[in-house]
Image: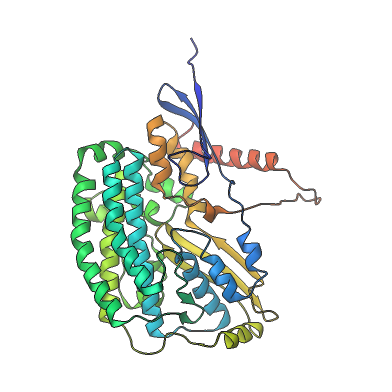
Amino acid sequence: MAKTTYYIPVGPIHPALKEPIRVEAEVEGEKIVKVDVKRGFAHRGIEYMGMKRNAIQTLYLSERICGICSISHPYAFVIGSEKALGIEAPPRAQYIRTIIAELERIHSHILWLGVIAHEIGFDPLLFWTWKGREKVLDILEAITGNRINYAMYMIGGVRRDLKESHIKALRDMITYYWEFTEHMKEVFLSDPVYKARTRGVAQLSKEMALKLNVVGPTARAAGLRMDIRQDIPYDAYADMDVKAIVPQDIVGEARGDAYDITMVRLYEIEQSLDIIEFCLDNLPEGKILAIPNYVALLNKIKKTEGEAIGAHEAPRGEVIHYFKYDGKRDGPAVWKVIAPSYNNINSWAPLLLGAEVADIPVVVAYIDPCMCCNDRVAVVEDSSGRLLDYSYLHKKAVEKTRKLEKELGVRK
């Protein structure tokens, strides 16, 4: 007798999803036997708009690519632009940038911890973690004027300096989060309910992580020692010894599941506290902008040709911005963005196959996806110049995914 399967669509609008994505699952009982992930529900055309504006306008447009990690894209933007334009930010500005980036990592990781707790139905844990997150958001607001979208970075430095009151507040925050993180580690890593819902769920092997090109905590949870701050250090990271946090250094092995990625994020919060403390202890004196006059900056851009890549280790993984300045206008002639969710979403289909229906929200939340970071419209021509329609492109993408799944042994 043939087995009966049922089709379950999840999204693009669903309580378990904070952004539009569609997961189409075919199940036998509670087991997922076939799955297809569809994206492409967010279209804003930010790259196109950015190439029609001057570099300063485009910088603050880049901050809107992601609403949560809103310093990650500007950070890659200023690093890439400075390389292309031959500008070096003052040392004090480099340290302030690093502090702001690590503050954002703390708030992003705590946010993720609350989200994953919510996805397994542990809402008291969600409310508790998000209450604790308020501390870092208050600090960001005090320094930059905003809790999200800080408008802090500038090509050649930062727009605002740190005051003594900010430094005192940062040191108080560090003390607060050492205690709070220890409590979070106790709750998340020792609670039997959380363990039961995350251990063995969304289990990503090192081999699969390499084949899928995942990045950030998703890669590190699988045991891959990769981190832009470690591999290609920049700004204040170049003055310290940042090491990628992997489960095998904490518990002796890496399983790559939702429990391991929780552990990685918790220990990365403590690492961020150490980095901020180092920056405060060694904060250089001096100016915060290489070119304080914005008109002079735009005039320099008009006269400078260059291309470069800027990379930053965002809370979700590496963010890459490619730039080409042609020396004819005051903005980028070419601007392309690669966000970590591009890579990490590829892990969903293999991780969902064989999982239970109740695990879908956990697998989706596992990578901390940002669908707005995946804003893309592809127009593709064949060798004769004929436009290829979406159905053809989707078919080819599915064929490629199925081939990879067979290679990884997740589909017969």
Residue 304 located left or right of residue 90: right
Residue 143 located left or right of residue 341: left
Residue 411 located left or right of residue 116: right
Residue found at the far bottom of this picture:
286
Q: For this rendering, which residue is in front, 163 or 369?
A: 163
User: Measuring 62% from the left and 63% from the top, which residue is drawn there?
Assistant: 47
Residue 378 rendering spot, x and y as whole percentages: 67, 52
User: Measuring 40% from the left and 41% from the top, which residue is drawn there?
Assistant: 363
Residue 90 rendering spot, x and y as whole percentages: 42, 85
- Against 86, is 23 above or below? above
| Snapshot quadrant of residue 145 | bottom left
Q: For this rendering, which residue is in front, 80 or 362?
A: 362
User: Measuring 24% from the left and 37% from the top, which residue is drawn there?
Assistant: 193
Residue 269 rendering spot, x and y as whole percentages: 29, 60
- Against 304, is 320 above or below? above
Figure label count:
0
* Residue 223 is at least partly visible in this image: no
| Snapshot quadrant of residue 337 | bottom right
- Against 38, is 318 above or below? below
- Against 295, is 323 above or below? above
Q: How is the image coloured?
A: rainbow
Residue 303 located left or right of residue 199: right
* Residue 267 is at least partly visible in this image: yes
| Snapshot quadrant of residue 132 | bottom left
Residue 121 rendering spot, x and y as whole percentages: 32, 37
